Image (tube, rainbow, N blue to C red):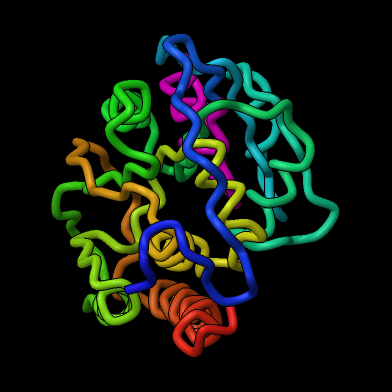
Amino acid sequence: MTPRGSRIGGGRKRAPRRPVPSAPRVVAIVAALDEEDSIAETVKALAGIEPVSEVVVIADGSTDRTGEEAAWAGARVMVAPRRLGKGGAVDSALDRVEPGDVYVLVDGDVGETAAETEALLQEMVAGRLDLAIGRLPLQEGGGFGLVKAFSRWAIRTITRFDPEEPLSGQRAITREALQACRPLASGFGLETAMTIDAVRLGFRVREVPVDMRHRPTGRTLTGFAHRARQGLDILRAVIPRGFGLR
């Protein structure tokens, strides 16, 4: 493992840790693709968390009413002119919003259970963690776990940190940690790369149990295609980090 506070591939170095203010500005960012059925509930749940100052939804290439539903629920909506992928969408939003002290990253399909991310925020405000990763209960209807196993293996091999839910998109992260991890990995490589970068830079990273639910992709052609894209994105993120190029 790279020593605490040291440089990693690409010459990046962790910024000095700044305590999170007792009343932090919290920005919730949701990258969503065709989530019109659940995005409004997700937005309302996030907005109902007391420390959250702003909810931002990036309608990343959506062809349905994701943007309209999110705006109706009170979110600030950004529409990408072309599909950027999850990592690119979040990175783009970060350049366009007023900086926060803490950021919450949530998937658009978690609905009302997005309120559970308050447990992640508590870790930030208490000063215990720099990156809190939501560990969801076992979800029914998923695939065979191959992509998840690969992501977990890669994180463990490169950093010695062994997450149970390496692909969890439900996260809270301090400004310093997030900026140190930028530019974010493209597509679905976002979470795996963020975890690797944060741990190697010496940030405090831990999983926190959250009772959240999201829509399973299932063992269908669409589900297998989704996981294939996910696996390729993770591979692209892992290779430069494994060889110390990033």
Q: Where is residue 131 in the image (x, y as percent from the top left)?
A: 38, 44
Image point (72%, 55%), residue name: 61
For the question of whether residue 62 can be seen, the reply is no
Question: Quadrant where the C terminus lies?
Answer: bottom right
For the question of whether residue 135 can be seen, the reply is yes
Residue 221 placement, left or right of 232: left
Furthest residue toward right: 81
Image point (41%, 38%), residue name: 172
Furthest residue toward left: 138
Q: Nearer the viewer, residue 170 or 39?
A: 170
Q: Is residue 67 magenta?
A: no
Residue 5 picture quarter: bottom left
Q: Position of residue 124 (x, y in %)?
A: 36, 29
Compared to residue 178, the image places residue 230 above or below, namely below
Q: Which of 49 and 44 is in front in this view?
A: 49
Image point (59%, 83%), residue name: 245
Q: Position of residue 107 (x, y in %)?
A: 46, 45
Question: Quadrant where the N terminus lies?
Answer: bottom left
Q: Where is residue 39 in the image (x, y as percent from the top left)?
A: 52, 34
Magenta-tinted stretch: 27-47
Residue 143 placement, left or right of 83: left
